[in-house]
Amino acid sequence: MDLSFVILVEIFYAIASLALISAGLAVVFGMMKVINLAHGEFMMMGGYATITAVNLGINVFVAMLIVAPLIVGVIGLVVERLVIRHLYGRLVDTMLATWGLSLFFIGMATMIFGNTTTSITTPITGFAVGNYQINGYNFFIIFVSVALMISMYVLLKTTRLGLIARGTMQRSDIAAALGYSPDRIYMATFFCGSALSGLAGAILAPLVGLVPTSGGAYIAKAFITVIAGGPSLITGLISSSGLFGVVNQIFTFGISPVFGEMALLVIAVLLLRLLPEGVTGKFFKGKM
Amino acid sequence: MSSSWGKQDVAAIIVALVLMWSMPSLISTYTLTVLIIYGMLGLSLGLIWGFGGILCFGQAAFFGLGAYTYAIAAINMGESTIPMFLAVIVPALFAAFLGVMMFYGRLTDVYLGVITLVVTLILFKFVNSTAGPQYVIGEARLGGFNGIPGFHTLNIPGQPEAYIWGDALYYVCAAALLFLYFFVTWLLRTSFGRIAVGIRENETRVSLMGYDVRARKTILFSIGAAIAGLAGAFFANWSEIVTPGLFSLGQSAEIIIWCIVGGLGTRFGPIIGAASLAYLKFLLGQQSLIDNTLITGIILVLFVLFLPKGIVPAVSSLLKISFGRRAIRKFGNRRTSRRVGKING
Amino acid sequence: MVETVLETTGLTMRFGGVVASNNVNFSLKARELRCLIGPNGAGKSTFFKCVIGLHTPTEGQVFMRGQETTGWHPHEIASLGVGIKTQVPNVMDGLTVFENIWMAGRRFMPSKEASRKAHEIIDRLALGSIAKAELGRLAHGERQRVELGLVAVADPWLVLLDEPAAGMTAEDVDRMSTILHELTRTAAVVIVEHDMKFIRSIASTVTVFHQGAVLMEDHVDKVMSDPVVRNVYLGKKV
């Protein structure tokens, strides 16, 4: 009984962290068709921003939820203006340029923070459930992830801003004819996407020792989750995170974490082969 | 479109021979050998991507497979000849399997890229985790993160004690690269090669002409993998150890960057891009002022933004404009598509 | 007894709830020239795509020279000796006119012969001055002409053209009529078209599509003077 509760929590945690990791990339890809391969490095910078802020005396939750996203959002803004802006519509070129940016950021971080591992302790302690110890921080992550999904949905579906953003993404020429500047919308969207990446990196920072190359562990998973999700932003994200999270945990519990990771990847390959349009390309069509 | 030897080919042989003979006085043969090996690797991606239009994010997978196949086979056989062959065949077969899975599923550009990327990751994670003594193929322990050292390196076929190393390995690799260059040149002049370029241009049209596009892409993909595998085998012989890093995402990224910087759609471009960037990395690695990775990143970004076609096409149009007869560009239709490339490039 | 080279029975194509092709029975004899007409959305192109293999029909069969080709891939159908031109020009932009046409011929003959036939077609279609030009740099009319050359070079016995006259000048259209007449000496030809003047100039049997189904099939003059067809084009309820 206790074991099943723990397993359930772990599964939800796996899904939640996958969704969290992928959210920033999903926003940028789903709304702008830009594949930002520097997403992992944005997360890494979110982590470093958090650690630096905490070391400067700022409350850890403020650092994670406000400072880090803001900083990374601004970095994203600069990146959009300088680089991404010139490459809209050129999918492959955007991938390559952002890959270059990711290398740039890794190099930068190495020069500023060095190669050694930096870390902070998890701000929420664990507690016991029967014979098992649960990491309380995992609940926090699940909570943040769910809150994020809900707010994104509400923002996009119900607010005027969300409507304008969605309209621009579908037909920027018509949005422009109606008086909305596509330029500004793209800037704002990329800012939000980067901020989300920063947020994810900040929240996950206490869990592992941070090194400049930490982003690399995330980008592949995020990338796969987003592409497999399909055209619908939020529904796709939840669907693919759900599927991959469950598969990952089953194999992790059944065999080992390495097999869990590999199983995720193998399922991803099969999924893409069978559903090249992503999950929401076939099911849940038309949902946000 | 002649299929016989032309001035360009003769010039290429002469230039190659001159370089082969003169470069060792500038750079050590040890370094030159790995630059040549990377050149082969670049050529393998340049062939399938620049001429075939197949965007593969995981070319390193075949490189690594070739290296590991060689190492494992060499340990089990104590001689290098058959392992070298296996190192070419195993990646090719794996690519054929992947190709059938991907190309027969009507997948497009980006998704192809994703799947090849994921496959590399799977291989990397798997090999990386094979540290225990139970992970053995014959007498070769896979060694996990530490890789496989101590295998029999290249020898003259039939004489296991007559090792080919140092300067001799350099000349063998250089000759191999020259051979591969002309193999690719020949291939692109055959009907198969010309149709492959057609597929890059407009797959639907080629299909409507009656060609089985899926099979052809699979075959081309396998040829590219075979070349990458051969490069991997030579690499194993050069470095005398094979590690999971050969399968890494970073390695795949580097190969792509070589092609972009060198010039996609040309034969020279990826080779030159690979050799120059690898050498640059080597030089940069010896200074600690600015981080290596940072510079590589900046280079990639700058090239994508300003020189998307790479160095070789830019230099070649510069030459045409300065010295060519038809210096005026007709129609002014500037193509920025990544898929441009002539068979003569 | 003239052979039936193309036949469909009960061909139906559904996309979700939309019936784009509705139980189409179609038959074409050797060396016959047929035009498919109908207002926008009538289902001509869907029918066309089902025949050439870009769609697999939901119901019904397609036969070519008695061989069932329902659900075949486009390349398998083309390999039978069928020349296909799609609605949007499908040519290889980065290659030259000669390369494009050579490749079409190469499928059915050795390289040298394909080169020879390509040069022949280039002359016949008056493409000599642009034979070495990259297709991406040519005007629309020229590209359409090249695509016609692609289709014709390997002496097909069935030619399927979707809007060959679209965006062409009057002069180009005249040239095309001549070529089509020549083609009918050896091939059966199906054309999807809107240009009535062009259709009249090739004066053939016409099949009228409406709401996915065949409305009428008769000589072009009879069809054009039929009041039902008029109403269909004008949008009046039939």
Image (cartoon, coloured by chain):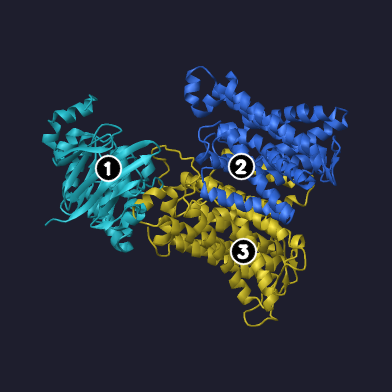
Chain colours: A blue, B yellow, C cyan
Which residue type does callout 3 highlight?
Answer: Ala
Do we see residue A221 in this rendering? yes
Quadrant for the N terminus of chain B in the image: bottom left
Q: CA distance from mark 3 to mark 1?
A: 57 Å
Q: CA distance from mark 2 to mark 1?
A: 40 Å
In the rendered image, residues at marks 3 and 1 fall on the same chain: no
Residue holding disc 1: C23
Counting from the top left corner in percent of width and height, residue A225 is at: 62, 43
Determine whether, in the image, residue B37 is placed left or right of residue C215: right
Question: Disc 1 on helix, strand or loop?
Answer: strand
Nearer the observer: mark 3 or 1; the answer is 1
Dot label at residue B231:
3
Determine whether, in the image, residue A208 is placed left or right of residue C131: right
Counting from the top left corner in percent of width and height, residue B66 is at: 62, 65
Which residue type does callout 2 highlight?
Answer: Ser
In the rendered image, residues at marks 3 and 2 fall on the same chain: no
Question: Disc 3 on helix, strand or loop?
Answer: helix
Determine whether, in the image, residue B202 is placed left or right of residue A277: left
Nearer the observer: mark 3 or 2; the answer is 2
User: Which chain does the residue under circle 2 lie in?
Assistant: A
Choose between C28 and B271: the one closer to the eye: C28
Choose between A174 and C35: the one closer to the eye: C35
> Residue at 27% of width from left, 36% of height from top?
C166
Residue holding disc 2: A240
Residue A198, by quadrant, is top right
Which residue type does callout 1 highlight?
Answer: Asn
Question: Disc 2 on helix, strand or loop?
Answer: helix
